[in-house]
C-alpha cells in the first residue's frame, strides 16, 4: 500500500501540500485536508471559522485539491485527500482527480464538530447515515479512486465492526481508525473485515504504540497533531520499519493478539 507504514493524518486548515512534503522523509502517505465539498459542509466550515477554528475554505475546492495534488506529483509520498460531503457527486469528481494522481480518497466520517454533525457529515455518518456512507464510498470508487474512510471509535451506539463491513462491501479498501484509547477496536475490525487495510491512529509516538497497534492487527499507523514534529515522525518511522516491514507480509494477520 505504502512504505514506510506511516501516514500523516489530516489536520483541518493545516494539512496541505507543503505540510505533506515536509513530512515525506518519514512517512509513506499523507492525507491533506479535510476539505468540505458541498454547500452544507462548506457552510458548516464557515461557522467553524467564525468561532475560531482553522479550516480550508478555498473558493473552488476541486481546483484547490488538484493544485495540491499537482504540487505533490514529484514528492516521494502517497498522497491522500480527506473530504467532507453529504452528497455523492462532488466525491465522485474528487475521486476522478485522485485517480489521475494515484492518490487515496478519504471520506471523513470522523469529525465531531457540532456544525458538521448537524448537517449529516463527519461522525454522524457512523450513527444515523450508514446508507449515505455507503453511497459516498461508491461514488469515490466510481471516480476510480482507492477509498479510505476515517472513523472514530468509542461513539455510543456505533458498532465499528459493522461499519467496517459496510466499508468493505461498498468497495472501500482502507479504514483509518482514531482508536480514542480503545486500541482493542483495531483487533475487532481486523477480525470482522480482514480484507481492509487498517491504519491505526491516536497516541502513535514510537515503538511501544506502534507495536501495540501491530499486535492488534493494524497494517500501518498514522500520526495526528505531532505530524509537524520531526523527532516524533522519525521515532514512528523507525518503529514502523522495525515492526511492520521486517514482518512476513504474507502472514500479515497471523500476529494478531489472541
Image (tube, helix red, strand yellow):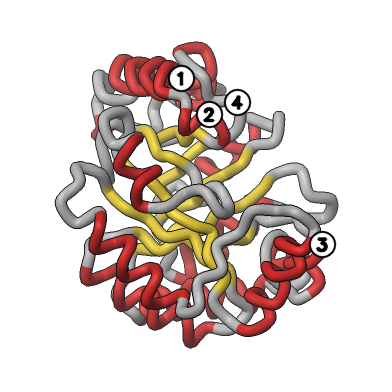
| Callouts 4 and 3 close, C-beta under 8 Å | no
Residue 121 lies, with reference to residue 79, above or below; the image says below
Q: Earlier in the sequence, mark 2 or mark 4?
A: 4
Q: Which mark is residue 114?
A: 3
Local secondary structure at mark 1: helix
| Callouts 2 and 1 close, C-beta under 8 Å | yes
Task: Please say whether residue 57 is visible from this viewpoint.
Answer: yes
Q: Find the residue positioned furthest to the bottom.
A: 89
Give the Cα separation between the discs numbered 2 and 4.
9 Å
Residue 33: x %, y % from top left: 49, 57
Left or right: 32 in relation to 119: left
Q: Earlier in the sequence, mark 1 or mark 4?
A: 4
Q: Which mark is residue 232?
A: 1
Q: Residues within 10 Å of mark 2 (few under 14, many from 20)?
A: some
Residue 249: x %, y % from top left: 25, 32
Give the Cα separation between the discs numbered 1 and 4.
11 Å
Residue sitting at 46 percent across and 75 percent down?
Answer: 61
Residue under label 4: 203
Q: Residues within 10 Å of mark 3 (few under 14, many from 20)?
A: some
Q: Which mark is residue 226?
A: 2
Quadrant of the rendered image containing residue 236 = top left
Image quarter hosting the C terminus = top right
Local secondary structure at mark 3: helix
| Callouts 3 and 1 close, C-beta under 8 Å | no
- Which of 208/20 is in front? 20
Give the Cα separation between the discs numbered 2 and 3.
24 Å
Q: Earlier in the sequence, mark 3 or mark 1?
A: 3
Amino acid at each position: 500500500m505504502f512504505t514506510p507504514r506511516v501516514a500523516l493524518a489530516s489536520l483541518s486548515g493545516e494539512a496541505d501540500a507543503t505540510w505533506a512534503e515536509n513530512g515525506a522523509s518519514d512517512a509513506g502517505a499523507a492525507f491533506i485536508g479535510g476539505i468540505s465539498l458541498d454547500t452544507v459542509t462548506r457552510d458548516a466550515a464557515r461557522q467553524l471559522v467564525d468561532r475560531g477554528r482553522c479550516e480550508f475554505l478555498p473558493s473552488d475546492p476541486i481546483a484547490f485539491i488538484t493544485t495540491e495534488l499537482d504540487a505533490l506529483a514529484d514528492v516521494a509520498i502517497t498522497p491522500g485527500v480527506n473530504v467532507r460531503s453529504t452528497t455523492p457527486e462532488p466525491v465522485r469528481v474528487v475521486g476522478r482527480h485522485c485517480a489521475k494522481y494515484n492518490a487515496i480518497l478519504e471520506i471523513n466520517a470522523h469529525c465531531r464538530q457540532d456544525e458538521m454533525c448537524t448537517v449529516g457529515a463527519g461522525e454522524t455518518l457512523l450513527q444515523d447515515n450508514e446508507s449515505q456512507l455507503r453511497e459516498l464510498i461508491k461514488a469515490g470508487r466510481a471516480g476510480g479512486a482507492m477509498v479510505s474512510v476515517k472513523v472514530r471509535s468509542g461513539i455510543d451506539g456505533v458498532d465499528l465492526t459493522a461499519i467496517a463491513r459496510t466499508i468493505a462491501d461498498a468497495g472501500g479498501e482502507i479504514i483509518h481508525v482514531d482508536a480514542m484509547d480503545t486500541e482493542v477496536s483495531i483487533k475487532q475490525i481486523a477480525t470482522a473485515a480482514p480484507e481492509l487495510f487498517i491504519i491505526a491512529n491516536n497516541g502513535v509516538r514510537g515503538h511501544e504504540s506502534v507495536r501495540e497497534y501491530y499486535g492488534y492487527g493494524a497494517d500501518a499507523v498514522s500520526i495526528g497533531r505531532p505530524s509537524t514534529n520531526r523527532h516524533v515522525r522519525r521515532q514512528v518511522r523507525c518503529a514502523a520499519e522495525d515492526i511492520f516491514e521486517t514482518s512476513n507480509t504474507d502472514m500479515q494477520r497471523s500476529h494478531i493478539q489472541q
